[in-house]
Amino acid sequence: MPRPAAASPPARRPPTSAKFDHILESATREFCEKGYEGASIRDIARRSRVSLAGLYYYVESKEKLLYLIQKHCFATLIARLKERLEAAGSDPEQRLRLLICNHLDFFLRHREAMKVLSHESDSLTPPYQADVAELKRAYYRLACAIVEDLKRERKLRNLNTRLAVLSLFGMMNWIYTWHKPRLDPDSDALAEHIAGLFLGGIEAEADGAARLGRGSNDRPRRT
Amino acid sequence: MPRPAAASPPARRPPTSAKFDHILESATREFCEKGYEGASIRDIARRSRVSLAGLYYYVESKEKLLYLIQKHCFATLIARLKERLEAAGSDPEQRLRLLICNHLDFFLRHREAMKVLSHESDSLTPPYQADVAELKRAYYRLACAIVEDLKRERKLRNLNTRLAVLSLFGMMNWIYTWHKPRLDPDSDALAEHIAGLFLGGIEAEADGAARLGRGSNDRPRRT
DNA sequence: TGACTTATCGAACGTTCGTTCGGTACTGTA
DNA sequence: TACAGTACCGAACGAACGTTCGATAAGTCA
């Protein structure tokens, strides 16, 4: 049973202190290496050079730790994208390239946090879960909107936006499982590659789907 | 006289018994739902309708359970692919489509096992790890060989095979995070979509890379 | 000086974990 | 009838888990 007591929770002191950030960073590394369930609060405390009890002065639970990591990571990713999109023009291809660039740049710059985000997306329970899910949905919608623009501009009537966007995310989010910084291209080259693959692909795909008489509206029957 | 304690482990009876398979299946579901670390042997035993100790008559450890699931799943996937490839012609595009079809068909037919395979690929420790890693490498090489053929046939001199293949796996292996059987296309339509995207993409990508003067041999400098 | 707050910790709490031990009941053979 | 092997389980083991408690210094301000 988690919290029976009705007393006053410590209400984490300054939400941004150097020590607090340090703990979040240690937790990120620990979750990244051992997974959420596999990582222990004791190891996180040790890594942060704080005692076990000392850690609880800053964070109220292990789950909240994961929540804060995911939330902060996602929020930053989205904020940067929005910034860059506002500074950009209205050309859909450029905007899509920007999304890919932003995603991969952030991904490789914060690979540990992004692995925790990708790999532990199901580890949170309802109170926190919904919050992160909302951010994910917002990000997904952003991508969909851009692909829809592209679809309109290029008259790719038969493109299934959902499938295309999720395939794109697949390419990008899978990278953490194989990318070796010293062996594989950097984020710019990677972005170029994936953008090329995707942009070339959707044109051919939409043609192919048309030829086969299957289009984006060709959704499976609902029971 | 009791048998020497350290000598003979129970040496799991018939490696294929109905009960043993049932346990493996229950474990698969449990690992799928809660992750390897999050799942408990007690829950697996309960799900298998065996007592906690009874489970150890069939399987010698939790890790071995994960190992057997991953190994069997991967081995079957590869075996089916090889079968189908042997029956197929030598056209690289057809062979690639076959690989994608096989992967997605198996993926959606055994979604729980495949999620355990994709999601827990880092959970095994050295004795078992290497064994599964070898299967993964074999599968990867199979895909690379096909893409290399395609590259030769279509003279896509500037295509980076590694990146292309891993992007393809990304699209395919990410599916378990979003595919809803009642809402999304079945495996054939999915395969069609991904094959179209990939095949269209690599042509454009290779052209684009050429135009930009970057090709598959343009690997990053090794410090 | 004394009352408060902030930052920190050692030690423990109760629970759950993976695993093992010592049994028992059934099922063939001999 | 006796014995060996198979299939199974209750109860426990020690370790590790997330979390809490009560205490203690150091700093702040009256």
Image (cartoon, coloured by chain):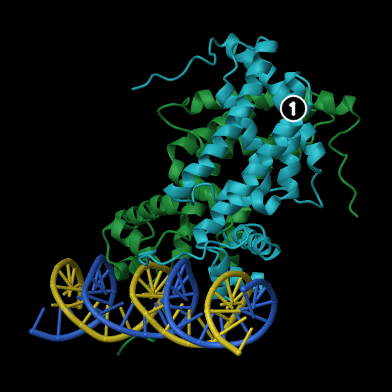
Chain colours: A cyan, B green, C yellow, D blue
> Which corner quadrant holds the N terminus of chain B?
bottom left
Residue type at mark 1?
A: Glu
Along the horizontal axis of the image, is B72 left or right of B20?
right
| Dot 1: element | helix
- Residue at 44% across / 41% down in the picture? B110
Residue B59, image x, y percentages:
39, 65
Residue A24 vertical position relative to residue B96 in the rendered view, above or below: below
Residue A157 vertical position relative to residue C18 in the rendered view, above or below: above
Considering depth in this image, is C25 or B61 the residue closer to the camera? B61
Name the residue that disc number 1 marks.
A86
> Which corner quadrant holds the C terminus of chain B?
bottom right
Residue A66, image x, y percentages:
55, 55
- Residue at 89% across / 28% down in the picture? B212
Residue B37 vertical position relative to residue A164 in the rendered view, above or below: below
Along the horizontal axis of the image, is B38 left or right of B101?
left
Residue A70 can be seen in this image? yes
Residue B196, image x, y percentages:
63, 22
- Residue at 84% across / 36% down in the picture? B216
Residue A110, image x, y percentages:
71, 50
Considering depth in this image, is D19 or A106 the residue closer to the camera? D19
Considering depth in this image, is B199 or B153 the residue closer to the camera? B199
Along the horizontal axis of the image, is A93 left or right of C28?
right
Crowding around mark 1 (Cα neighbors within 10 Å: few <14, some 14 to 19, many 20+) is few
Q: Quadrant of residue A45?
A: bottom right
Considering depth in this image, is A126 or B118 the residue closer to the camera? A126
